[in-house]
Amino acid sequence: MALQTNKKKTTVAVLVNISRVLLGLVLVVSGFVKAVDPMGLFYKLGDYAMAFGVADISDAWLQFFALLLCGAEFVLGVLLFLGVYRRPVTIVTFLFFLLFTPFTLIIALWNPVRDCGCFGDAIHLSNWATFGKNVLLLVMSTLVAFKYRLFVCRVSRNARWMVALFAICYVVFLEGVALSYLPAIDFRPFAVGANLREATVDIPSEKKSLYKFEKDGVVMEFGDEDYPDSTWNYLGSRDVILKEGRPALIADFSFVDDATGEEFADIILSDSGYVGILVMERLEVANESRVDKINDMYDLFCEHEAMFYATTSSSEEDILLWRKRTGAEYPILWADNIMLKTMIRSNPGFILIKDGLVVAKWNGVDIPEIDNISKSTPLESLKMTGLYKLTRGWNFWLLLFVIPIFFIVIIDRLLYKKPNSMKEKNDSEK
């Protein structure tokens, strides 16, 4: 009997710790991919506010909630994954999923927004898939909330504050880079290196036709390459998909001159040289502090006889007012505001394209200085520099996460004494 009881306790402990690790990983990933692009979550919250009739919530509050939500998810995930602050963390996690699971059911039934945005632009789930995921996570969070004493803790009570402080500083730095510059990891189809020509067209599925024939009681399928002779009796055919196609990643790539109605999207994509696109989603709130740098950039493109366009979703009146305030001489085209928000998380922002490829992107305040406008200043010298260049990509953020956690664990092992008894261990982690 005692053996069976111990086996049962061991099984429960294994399930609890598997649930703890999985919950922690989901929250870390979910928090990270949203924190790397908090403006994306801000836009998604705006969609929810519009769908539920509370569109009068200020942008400042929506942005604050977006930063708080993705930051809280990430910190909870780190603490849960390492098994520290067990009781408060498991309670908050349980309440988190208890709140959001019914909400995702409402979203699935009503479908006011196509994608919940729970994994940002990195992973897209249907609303029903999101609800199913949250039901599973709610069950797991319930288990860990009631059985938190069975956690296998990776750091002692003395070092857990370092884990919490590190997680908070990490996610604040991640969000700060995104807001001050641009998302360090871009999951959208306008990321640096993206081929816009491929992203703006549908890719059809590759299919093969198979024909079913019968002869002397034998039924076989043939393709076009080995079509049988007339001695076989035709029974039917079917298509086999060899390679799945996909719709265009950018379905609304369009830039229109309001005055003439001329479409410039194909012109931009077909140009084999450099093309500069200044994105100003809303002119009435665009940052004017770098107007001189923008005008200098336009002059540089003119010197090289390269195309330079500004694009906005604002009205003709706002465009005229912008020209009057800034002395802008560059052509300004109209584009859909959702596409402009997807192109770059900055108002204004600048994108450099060459031969259909996205070469570089800058936040409006980070546009390169052009001191001497001349043909001796090649456009290929316009590169991303500074902190944003250093922090771009997975490698930097993975190392920035793993190395400090590793040192925290080492310091904990070297400096702090581990609890000697199960009672001390349980008491220390309450």
Image: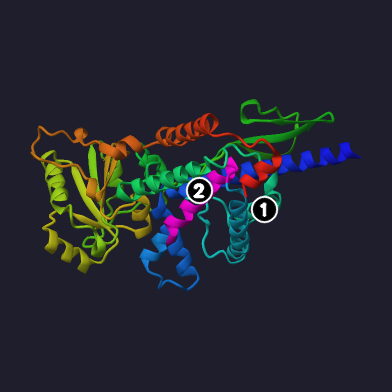
Tell me if residue 81 is in the magenta stretch: yes
Tell me where residue 170 appears, x and y as whole percent. 42, 43
Q: Amino acid at mark 1?
A: Ala
Q: Please tell me which of labels 1 and 2 falls first in the chain.
A: 2
Instruction: Tell me the residue at 20%/47% (across/down).
Output: 308
Tell me where residue 353 appears, x and y as whole percent. 28, 40
Q: Is residue 410 left or right of residue 391?
A: right
Element on which disc 2 rests = helix
**Which numbered disc covers residue 75?**
2
Above or below, 315 relative to 308: below
Q: Nearer the viewer, residue 307 or 399?
A: 399
Marks 1 and 2 close (CB-CB < 8 Å)? no
Q: Nearer the viewer, residue 31 or 77?
A: 77
Outermost residue on the right side: it is: 1
Above or below, 79 relative to 348: above
Q: Is residue 342 left or right of residue 16?
A: left
In three-dimensional space, the C-alpha distance between marks 1 and 2, rounded to whole angstroms, equals: 17 Å
Q: What is the quadrant of residue 209 in the picture? A: top right
Q: Check disc 1 and report the residue beneath it.
A: 145
Q: Magenta stretch mostly in which secondary structure?
A: helix
Query: Can residue 224 be spotted in the picture?
Result: yes
Q: Say how the picture is coloured.
A: rainbow
Q: Amino acid at mark 2?
A: Val
Instruction: Tell me the residue at 21%/66% (across/down).
Output: 318
Which range is magenta?
Answer: 65-84
